[in-house]
């Protein structure tokens, strides 16, 4: 009896190795995985009412995250009534449309709660790789889709998915500009402010949004939440802009202008106390701070060399180092939560604004956008895999999302409008 | 031919390069002769005769197969589709669009026009390579795929 046991012991490790299929997202050989997302199966009428919301959120998550090539539903050969378990699925029909993975979902309702099941199949092997079940209140069909999509993202990347994160932006209103808070796909948007001019929002790690508002005539920094009045955080000198919170949430960096010049300050994030001047350059502007993920360094924009360029310094203002040497206009740095890259807006030789990344250590620059009107104001997803930005490619400034290397540029399916300065947080 | 010998260089200098001008002349004439004669050689009607004894093409199961059975029903793989849907199904099919090829598996008793309709649909959908599946040396009639017998 010992021989079969030894054989089994030899087989098990190789089988386990074969099971690990982590999608490596970076690198020249990256190819989005062809995935078929079947039309969700609906169990009852109450669930049917949420089908459109659920399905559109699910499809957006899969198609915008950059991991997958979502196959066109018009090409599907399996009947829409096909079952959701492996034994009921004709995998040949899915491999004939080019699918390597197949996602089947099913939603049902018990009056109060919406239940969702998602199964992920390996089409070539005809095997169920993942099964997740989630439940949410009836009105949160989109969140149910985001939760299920996150499980698939985690299955392939071993990283937390970005689909339950939040974004914020400033949008033109009849009376000025308002700050909004929304899901990562731009849906479920709620106003944080109501009236006046409110710009440059930044998500506060503990909840809420910090933004510069003219509500007391002077552009000072406030923190607000939907449904409550904003609270003044830093009100000093002529102008307080460009708030950025350190990753641990304890510090806030801002740019405060005092007449001729503007300097970077840091303060306690909770109450704005302990305001400390970090840069000190008479007659020059220092703006747009962005923290490194370890909270030890700050990237910012300064015109001390004659035109705006990206600089890096420690959080105390030491070791100031110029990062960009190409072009005459480089602004809005955003430090990737992965630490390696800083995305920024640059004006190129044709006077178009486009997005670039620069590697902090090597200084290697990569172009992300080109020939698509003006693209500005990058913001990284909390996992550093995606970039949210504004673009005028389809008229007014609108929000778009792409992977950190500029692939898979997708327009957020939200109302048209003049959107600016997006920020992205957990 | 002018040779630039350095000013003040004593005596004669030898020309150390190959004189390429005559070679280029000859090559150019040869090139023109070949260009003129090549089309002449290729005249005549060209017919690719069916080669029944040819080695079968390695049709791996990963390739897309479109089948037409004796009742003129059209299948992509194992799934039946309407002929009028075929173009859109192939146009949106990621596999067909990536490979740009499919294999046609048609019953031998079918009218030529039916097969041509399917091939035309494939071509409109951008599938440029259509391979024909045959049974080598009349081993039997082409039958429809197993799983679609209902």
Image (cartoon, coloured by chain):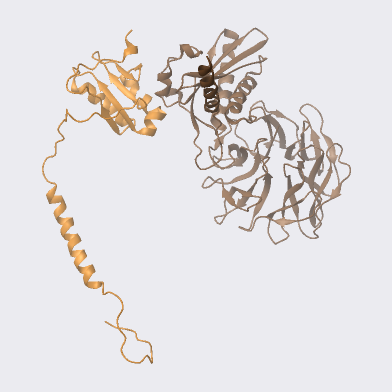
Chain colours: A brown, B orange
Q: Residue furthest left?
A: B44
| Residue A219, horizontal then vertical, whole percent | 80, 44
Residue A81 appears in the rendering: no
Residue A151, compared with residue A286, is above or below; it is: above
Residue A173 image-quadrant placement = top right
Quadrant in the rendering for residue A220 = top right
Q: Nearer the viewer, residue B44 or A295?
A: A295
- At a point 53% along the width and 37% down the height, the residue shown is A408
Q: Residue at x 59, y 37 (%)?
A: A400
Does residue A116 lie above or below B122 as drawn? Answer: above
Q: Quadrant of the C terminus of chain A?
A: top right
Question: Which image quadrant for residue A269?
Answer: top right
Left or right: residue B113 versus residue B73 is: left
Q: Where does residue A97 sit, x and y in percent of width and height?
A: 41, 25
Position of residue A150 measured from the top left corner of the image (x, y, whole percent):
62, 25
State the residue at coordinates (17%, 23%).
B137
Figure check: B4 above or below A45: below
Count how many numbered circles sit on residues in the image: 0
> Residue B6, can we see it?
yes
- In the image: residue A270, left or right of residue A116: right
In x, y percent, where is residue B65? 32, 24
Residue lying at the far front of the rendered structure? A2
Closer to the camera, A239 or A113? A113
């Amino acid at each position: 009896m010992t021989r079969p046991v030894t054989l089994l012991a030899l087989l098990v490790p190789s089988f386990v190795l074969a099971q690990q299929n982590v999608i490596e997202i970076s690198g020249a050989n990256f190819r989005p995985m062809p995935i078929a997302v079947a039309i969700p199966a609906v169990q009852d009428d109450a669930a049917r009412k949420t089908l459109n919301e659920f399905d559109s959120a699910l499809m957006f998550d899969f198609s915008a995250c950059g991991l997958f090539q979502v196959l066109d539903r018009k090409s599907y050969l399996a009947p829409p009534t096909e079952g959701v378990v492996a034994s009921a699925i004709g995998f040949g029909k899915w491999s004939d449309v080019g699918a390597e993975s197949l996602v089947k979902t099913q939603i049902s309702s018990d009056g109060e709660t919406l239940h969702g099941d998602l199964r992920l199949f390996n089409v070539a092997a005809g095997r169920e790789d993942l099964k997740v079940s989630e439940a949410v209140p009836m009105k949160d069909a989109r969140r149910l889709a985001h939760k299920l999509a996150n499980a698939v993202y985690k299955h392939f990347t071993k990283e937390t998915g970005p689909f339950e994160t939040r974004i914020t932006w400033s949008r033109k209103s009849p009376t000025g500009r308002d700050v909004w808070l929304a899901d990562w796909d731009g849906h479920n948007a709620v106003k944080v402010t109501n009236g006046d001019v409110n710009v440059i929002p930044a998500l506060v790690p503990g909840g809420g949004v910090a933004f510069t508002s003219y509500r007391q005539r002077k552009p000072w920094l406030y923190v607000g939440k939907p449904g409550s009045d904003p609270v003044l955080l830093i009100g000093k000198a002529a102008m307080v802009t460009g708030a950025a919170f350190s990753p641990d949430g304890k510090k806030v960096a801002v740019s405060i202008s005092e007449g001729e010049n503007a300097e970077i300050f840091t303060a306690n994030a909770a109450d704005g106390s302990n305001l400390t001047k970090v840069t000190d350059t008479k007659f020059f502007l220092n703006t747009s701070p962005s923290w490194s993920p370890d909270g030890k360094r700050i990237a910012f924009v300064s015109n001390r060399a004659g035109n705006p360029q990206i600089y890096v310094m420690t959080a105390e203002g030491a070791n100031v180092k110029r990062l960009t040497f190409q072009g005459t206009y480089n602004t809005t740095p955003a430090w990737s939560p992965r630490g390696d890259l800083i995305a920024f807006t640059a004006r190129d030789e044709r006077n178009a604004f486009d997005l670039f990344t620069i590697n902090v250590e090597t200084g290697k620059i990569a172009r992300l956008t080109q020939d698509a009107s003006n693209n500005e104001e990058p913001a990284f997803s909390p996992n550093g895999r995606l970039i949210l930005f504004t673009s005028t490619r389809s008229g007014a400034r609108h929000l778009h999302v792409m992977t950190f290397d500029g692939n898979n540029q997708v327009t957020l399916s939200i109302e048209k409008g003049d959107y600016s300065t997006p920020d992205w947080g957990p | 031919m002018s040779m630039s010998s350095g000013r003040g260089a004593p005596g004669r200098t030898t020309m150390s390069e190959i004189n390429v001008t005559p070679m280029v002349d000859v090559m150019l004439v040869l090139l023109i002769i070949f260009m003129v004669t090549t089309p002449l050689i290729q005249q005549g009607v060209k017919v690719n005769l069916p080669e029944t004894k040819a080695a079968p093409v390695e049709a791996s199961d990963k390739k897309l197969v479109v089948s037409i059975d004796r009742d003129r029903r059209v299948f992509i793989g194992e799934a039946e589709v309407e002929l009028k849907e075929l173009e859109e199904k192939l146009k949106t099919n990621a596999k067909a669009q990536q490979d740009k090829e499919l294999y046609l598996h048609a019953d031998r008793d079918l009218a030529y026009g039916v097969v041509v309709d399917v091939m035309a649909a494939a071509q409109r959908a951008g599938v440029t390579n259509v391979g024909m599946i045959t049974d080598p040396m009349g081993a039997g009639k082409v039958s429809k795929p197993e799983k679609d017998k209902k």
